[in-house]
Structure formats: C-alpha cells, structure tokens
Image (spheres, rainbow, N blue to C red):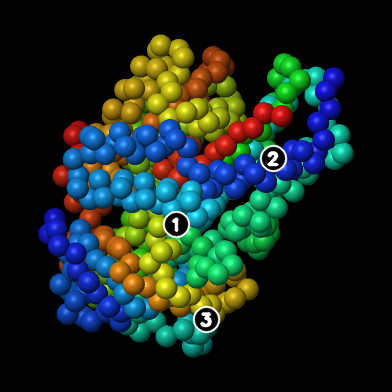
Amino acid sequence: MRTIDAQHITETIVRLCMEANYNLGDDMLAAFDKALTTERSAAGRGVLEMFKENAQIARTQRLPYCQDTGFVICFVDIGQDVHITGGLLEDAVNEGVRRGYKEGYLRASIVADPFNRKNTGDNTPAVVHTQIVPGDKLTLMVMAKGGGCENRSKYKMCTPAEGVEGAKNFVIECIRTAGPDACPPLIAGVGIGGTFERAALLSKRALFRGIGEPNPKPDLQELERELLEKANKLGIGPQGYGGDTTAFAIHVNTYPCHITSLPVAVTIECHAHRHKEAVL
Amino acid sequence: MAGEEIRQLTTPLADADLVSLRAGDRVRLSGVLLTGRDAAHQRLIALLDAGQSLPIDVRGQVIYYVGPSPPRPGMVIGSAGPTTGGRMDSYAPKLMALGLKGMIGKGARSLPVREAMQKHKCVYFGAVGGAGALLSKYIKSAEIIAYEDLGTEAIRRLVVEDFPVIVIDDTHGNDLYEEGRKQYAQE
Ligand code: SF4
C-alpha cells in the first residue's frame, strides 16, 4: 500500500490546468505544420498560421490559447494499492481547479445550475472520472474542454444491421453538422460499443491519445484512416472558410456490446486541444 | 470569392462600406467594438420586450461576441477570441432593427438572421475561433460599461486597432461558409 496525500493531487492539478491552457501539445503543433503542406485554400493556410502564432504567444506570455478555458475533465486512474490520505479525491481535484484557474488568470465558465445559470466563479466543479487499475501509481489526466465544440458532440444508438457503415456515416454526419461552429480543424473522439454511458466515456478517453497515434488494432486503424479521409473531403476547412483540413485526427475506441445494440458516441474537440497528464 | 487585398475599416461603419463588402473579404477593423454574449443579450432583449431603454446605444455599432479571460496585472485584457454566433440568433434581429451594423463571432447564422442582415444592412464578420491569445494583441483598451455582475459576460467597450476579421455573411445574402465548402468539397 502506498499513500498519496490529497494536497499532492491538488498541487498537481493546479499545474496541469495552467500548462494545458498555455502550452498546446507538440503533437498539435506538428499537426498544424503537416496541414500547411497539404491545405490548398489560402484562407485555410492563413488560419493555420494564426494558430501557430497564437500557440507561440500563449506559451511565451502564459496567456490561455483560447479564452474558453473550458470545463475541466479529469480522468483519474488509481492503482489499487494506493491509499489517498488527507481529504477526498474529488475535493482535491476541485481545489486544484479552483486555484489553477484563479492563479492562472483562466476564465470561469461553469454555471451552478443548468437553469438558473449562475456562474460558480472559480470554474468548479470538474467532471471527474475514476478508474481502478493495477499497481501503486495514480495518473491524473486533465483536459480543458471547450464549450463550442462539446456542444456538437452526439450519440446514436445504431442497430446491429447498420453495422460499421452506419457508424461511419454517423461520425461523418457529426463532423458535417458541427461545421464551422466547433472551430475546425477538429479532432473526433469516437466510442463504439458498451452501453449509452460507456460509449460516451470511450469517446472522451480517445481524445487523450496523441494526434496521429493510431489505434493499435489494425481494423480500427484502417477505420480511423478512412474516417479522416472522408472528413477531409467535406470541404469545410480551417474555421469553415473552405479547404482540405476539416479534421486533424479521428480516434476510435471500442468495447463489447449487447446483442441488440451498436452504440456510437462522438465527442467533438477543436484545435484548442488542451490536455496534460501526470503520474504520481 | 473575394479578392486578396485587405480592407481597412473604422467603426462606426458607414452604409456605403457595409454594402461594398462581400463574403470572403478580409478586413482590419479599427475603432470601438462593444462586447456581448448570451447573458448580456438575454438582458438587453428582456429590456426591449418590456419597452424599456437599453444601457448601451447600438446604433452604428459592432458587437463582438466574446467572453474574455481575466487580464494579468498590467494587461488590457486576457485572451479574447470569438464565441459561437448562432447562440445569439434569437436576439440579433431585434438589435439590427435598432441600428446595429456589425457582429463578430464564429460559426453559422440562421436564415432569418441573414435575411435581417440584408434588410438592415448589417455584416457578420468571423474572427478566428480559438486564436484568443493572438487576437487580444489587437485590443488597445477595455472597459466594462454594463452588467459588471456578469463577469466575463459583461458588456465591454473595446478599442481595437487592425483587428483581423473576414466577412462571413454580407448584406447581399452571400455566405462564406457555403461558398468555401462548395469550392473544396470532394463528394
Ligand atoms: S470551440 Fe475550441 S477553439 Fe473554439 S472557442 Fe471553443 S474552446 Fe476555443
């Protein structure tokens, strides 16, 4: 049994919230460069250049890459030989978000109630997903998830008869209907299988994979490649101004499902793809 | 689609300039922008519906749909990129009827809004969504002029210099998103 102090979790979350918002990942910067070599639209290339400049300013001046500093989604993988002391896990995460957003000059974007819509003022609470895993480590995965793109995420319960074609059509339909609103070029996290809620979780978790890192299963790798090619033929382009780069990546994760079901969940993520991890 | 040269315009925008703009035109805006997004629009429209006057004069103005991040000490503003314009669709025609001449956001607008833009000679500009750190550099001053309690959603008066935008919807019914997609779609 290994003990981890809640305070240590809080401190780590403070740092991850800031780093995620200021420092876009190298995989995203590489995706911008790669798209610049293939994008035919001049307006589209102009947008990609602005992303690069924006990332540079954000990193050097510690300004958020996007003013929508998002809903904090935190996946916590807890080794089953870990014992957390000195407070509750969720409280520790929320305290980290509270401090990270305040001390980091990040925007508070969460309202306390879906109907009365009063801002909580400190970007809490986070959405925390825990999972027990083997070992004595604790992994914190933080994502600052923008609203504009999240609002375009969708779920469909396909029938088994619709099969892989039905799933493909639905993913492309999600990207088409997201259109310019979700700040393309996009990343789509796709969860297929499980149940209603498991599919949604798979789709979120798929976003934590590095851009351009394919699913290890060959058939899913091929599916991801085909979906990306289709998405980039839609013509939506950077910011929807028209072009060849509508998506940077599509990540598919699957899970067994019931004989009657074919759940498909698509989380839409924008180019402000902000996430960081730490292992305690 | 529009030409390569960049138009320089200063607010308040003149009708002659507005009608000369075409979807796809790149524009650098200077002068005053007012900010407002969901919560501020909701309050403004509630006042109008109750027959009361507004705390701001929208005649000839450009509204920027933005909820900036907090400024660091010594900075004018934090990151300040556009939010999705479509969420303001149910409010926008009422402000255009009062004389609003421009809106800056990202994402598509509904047909009724585009029709109102033709009728009232108002242009919808796009700023690059997610480029908030970069866009903040074109903002020279920021001051809250209404609804301070709304925090990031308060109405601010910004002074901008060469703020980069592109015309999404012009006063003639053209839409950059439709035109751009048609040009590049391979279906
Ligand atoms: S969709 Fe993404 S890039 Fe666009 S405003 Fe929202 S968080 Fe920023």
Mark nearer the viewer, 3 or 1: 1
Residue type at mark 3 is Ile
Tell me the SS state at disc 2: helix
Tell me the SS state at disc 1: helix
Give the vertical position of B66 relative to A241 (above or below).
below
* Image quadrant in which you'd find residue B176: bottom left
Which residue is the site of mark 2? A12
Q: Is B107 displayed left or right of A73 in the figure?
A: left
What residue is drawn where x is 48% and y is 75%? B142
Disc 2 crowd, CA 10 A, few/some/many (<14, 14-19, 20+)? many
Chain of the residue under label 1:
B
Q: Earlier in the sequence, mark 3 or mark 1?
A: 1
Q: Is B120 displayed left or right of A92 in the figure?
A: left
Mark nearer the viewer, 2 or 3: 2
Give the vertical position of A189 relative to A73 (above or below).
above
Residue B91 at x, y = what percent?
A: 43, 70
The verdict on label 3 being within 8 Å of ligand 1 is no
Which residue is the site of mark 3? B145
Residue type at mark 2 is Thr
Disc 3 crowd, CA 10 A, few/some/many (<14, 14-19, 20+)? some
Which residue is the site of mark 1? B133
Residue type at mark 1 is Ala
Can residue A252 be seen in this snapshot?
yes
Q: Say if labels 1 and 2 share a chain.
A: no
What residue is drawn where x is 42% and y is 48%? A56
